[in-house]
Amino acid sequence: MKKKVMALLLCTSMVAAMLAGCGKSPAATESSDSEKGKTEASNSTEADFAGEELSILVSAGWMDNRYDATIARFEDTYDVTVDLQTIPADQYSDVLQSKLSTDSCTDIFWIQSDPFAIASQIVDPDKYCIDFTGAAWEGVIPETRLQSCTYDGKLYGLQLWHNSPEYIMVYNKTMFEENKWEVPATYADLKDLCAEIADKDITPWFVPGADGWQHQLSFFQIGGVYEAAAPGLYEGLNDNTATFAGNEKMLEVLKEFKELSDAGYLGEDWIGTDSTNMSNEFGDRNVAMAMANSSYIKQIQEDTGTSDEFGLFLLPLGDNDTFPTNPGGPTMFGYEGSEHPELVKAFFEFCTTTESLQEILDNSPAYTNIDVNDDKVVQKWLPEEEEFMAAIPAEKMKTGVLQTSTKYTNDYWMDFGADMIAYCQGTMEADDVLKNMDANRAESAKVAGDENWK
Amino acid sequence: MACCTICLERVVTVNKKRIYPQWFLIIPLVLYICFFLFPSILGVLYSFTDWNARSAMTGINFVGLQNYTEIFTSNKDYVSGILHTLSFTVVSNMIKLVPALLLAIMLQEGLRGKGLYRTLLYLPSILPFVIIGLVFKSILNYNTGLLNMVLDALHLGILKQKWLSDLNVVWKSIYGVDAWRGIGYVMTIFLAGLNTIPKSYYEAAQIDGANFWQRIRHITLPMLTGAIMINLVFGITYGLKVFDIIYVLTNGGPGHATEVMTTYSYQLYSSGQYGMSTALNTILLGITAFIGIMVVRVMSKKEVQQ
C-alpha cells in the first residue's frame, strides 16, 4: 500500500512538473498584456535591460555587416546580448512564416515590405507585431516609405533603406569603351551585344540563379513597360480584373530571358551560381554586366581594387525604358509575443539616432545614401548615380515596380523564381509560369479575405 | 467452491509475479493519446477544412475533399512531388541497403582495422543535415567546387557536371550524398544482425563444401531477415518523409525538379495554407502506413516460413 501511495505521489509530481513547463509565466503574461495597445514614449535609456538577450531574425543581405557596429554599441550601452539569426535568402520566407504561425518568433523579425506586404505577409499584424504608433522615430521615415511600415493607421515597421536606383544594369564602362561596345537600348541591341561579349570569352550578363531571388528581378523591375503596353494593368491586377496569364508583354520578356539563357549569355551555369563571387568576377573582368544596385559599383571597387569605371543603364528586356521606382524595402518589426518588448523598442530607437544612421550608412559598402528624414546624416551619392538619374525623364519614373505595386505579387517572389528556372530548363511553359502567379495571388487573396477575389 | 478458490489463488499468484501494476500504463497512454494520437487525428480532420493563416478571424470551414482535389488537379504539380517521393524511397533504399550489407559482411570477416573502418563509415550519420548540405553544396559547385576542380586536375574535365543544377544529374547528386550519409547507419544494423548468427552454421556449411556466395544466400540472408526488415522499414519511412537532405541541397530546385511531398507541404504551411498542407501530409501518412504494413507483413511471413 505504501508503495502504491509513493508511486501515485511520484506520478502526480511528475505530471505537475511537466504541465508547469507548458504554462506561461505570470510575469510574461503580465508583461505581454501591459504591452498591448498604443506605445507610450518610453525612457529606454534609463531602463535596466542588463543580461537580457534580443533575438533578430533576418534574411541574408538585409543587415549584413552594416549593423554590426550599431549592434555592438547597443550591446555595450544596455549590457545586453543580440542574437542575430541570418537565414539564407531562399529559405527566409519559409522560416519566418513557420515561426510566426507557431508563435515562436524572435524578438525582431524582418520582411521585404511594400504597401501591401504587411497585410499579405504578416496577415494579422495586431497579433504578431508590436504597435509603435506615436514612437519618436516615426518622423525619421520618409512619407513614401511610411506606407510600407503602417497598416490600418498603426505604425508597425521601421524601414531604413537607401534610395539609389535599385537593380538596374551595372556594366564595366572601361571594358565597353575599350571594345567599342554600345550601351543597349532595346532587346535586339542587348542580344547583339551579348553575342559580341561572349565571343571574347566573357560572361555577358552575370545572373546568380542559385540565390533564388535575383534572376526574377529582370522580370519584375521593368513593371513600367507592362503598364505602358497595357495601361491600367496595375489597377486591374489589384482589383482582380486582369491577370498575369496571357499578358503578351510579360510573355515576350520571359521568352527573351530564356533566349539569352539558352544562348549561354547568362553564364555557363547561371542556375547553379550564386552571387558570392560576383564582385570578384567583375573585378577580374570575367563578366561585363549584371543587375545590381547602383551603389554596387562602390562595392566592386572596394572589394577588388579595380581601377575600371562602371556605368548604369536600364534593363532593355521588352524594350524597357522605364525606371524601377520602388518605395519598398527590407523592414524590421517587433514581435508582439516577445518577452523583451521594451528592449525591442529601445533597439528601434537606438537604430534611428543620427549616430546610428550615419554608422549604418558608413558601414555599408553597398549604400551610397540612406533614405531618412535627418539632415545631419552625410549622404554619399555617386557621380554615376547622379548622372544616370539626371538622364531619365520624369515621366519614366512614375510607375512602380511590378512586385511592390501590385497586391500579393511579392509574396510569391521565390515561387516565381523557381517557375522561371523551370521554364528556362524547358519543364514549364511561359504562360504556366504566369498562371501559377495568378493562382498563388488568388490563394493569398483568399487567405486575406480580399473582396475582389470573392 | 474449491475451483473458485484455486482460480483466485492463481490470479493472486500471477499478480504477485507481475513486476509493475497495470495502471502504470495510464500515464504514458494519456500522454501518447494527448500529444501524438489526438493531434494526428486532428491533423487528418483539418485536411478537410479551409484552415489558413486568417482562420483566427474568419473561422475554419469544412470544405470536403476540395484540398485533395486541388492537390491532384492543380497547376502546381503536387503529383510530381508525390512521384519524386516514391522514387526517392525506392532508389535511396536500394543504393544504401546493398552496399551497406556488403560492407557489413566485409567488416564482420577478419578484416584488419575493422573497428576503425566501422567508425569511419558511421561518422557521416552523426553529422547534422545542415552541415552536410553546406559542405556538399560547396563541393558540388560547378565553377568553384572541389569535385569539378579535382576532375580538372586529373584531366577528366569531360566528367565535369552541373551537379546541382542539371536536371539529368541533380537527383543522382542527392542520392550520392544521401548514401554517403546513410550507409554507415544501415551497416551498423546489419552488423548487429550478423553478430547474432552462430559461427557453427558457417563451419558446418564449409564442411559441406558451401562457397562464400552459397553461405551468404543460405545462411546470412535468411538469418538476417530481422535486420533487413528493420532497415527496410526505417529506410522506407525515412524515404517517404525525406525533407532535410533535399532542402539543404537544392530546396526543391532547380525549378521544381526535386520537389518532394514534404517540401511542398512546408511551402504550403509557410504561406499560411494549413488545410492544404495537412491534406498533403495526410496523403503521405496514408502511403507510409500502407507501405509500412505491407513490408512488415511480407517480411513476417518470410520469417515464419523460415
Image (cartoon, coloured by chain):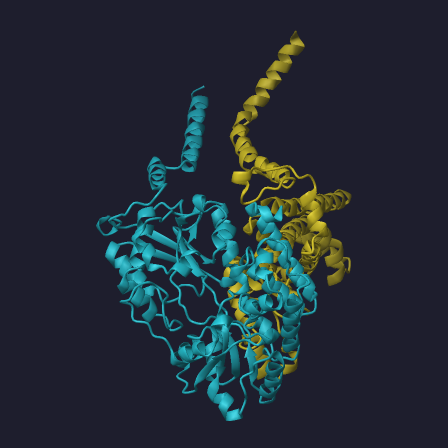
Q: Is residue B235 left or right of residue A175?
A: right
Q: Quadrant of the C terminus of chain B?
A: top right
Q: Is residue B295 left or right of residue B174?
A: right
> Which residue is nearer to you in this view: A31 or A319?
A319
> In x, y percent, where is residue B147?
57, 75
Q: Residue furthest top?
A: B1
Q: Is residue B72 above or below residue A318?
A: above
Q: Colour of chain B?
A: yellow
Q: Is residue B102 above or below residue B47?
A: below
- Examine the rendering and report whether any part of residue B118 can be seen: no
> In x, y percent, where is residue A132?
35, 49
Q: Is residue A291 left or right of residue A352?
A: right
Q: Residue furthest left?
A: A46
Q: Colour of chain A?
A: cyan
> In x, y percent, where is residue B33?
57, 33
> Which residue is nearer to you in this view: B299 or A173?
A173
> In x, y percent, where is residue B86?
70, 55
Q: Is residue A428 left or right of residue A276?
A: right
Quadrant assignment, res A182: bottom right
Q: Residue at 59%, 55% (x, y): give it.
A: B243
Quadrant assignment, res B136: bottom right
- Examine the rendering and report whether any part of residue A149 can be seen: yes
Quadrant assignment, res A430: bottom right
Q: Quadrant of the N terminus of chain B?
A: top right
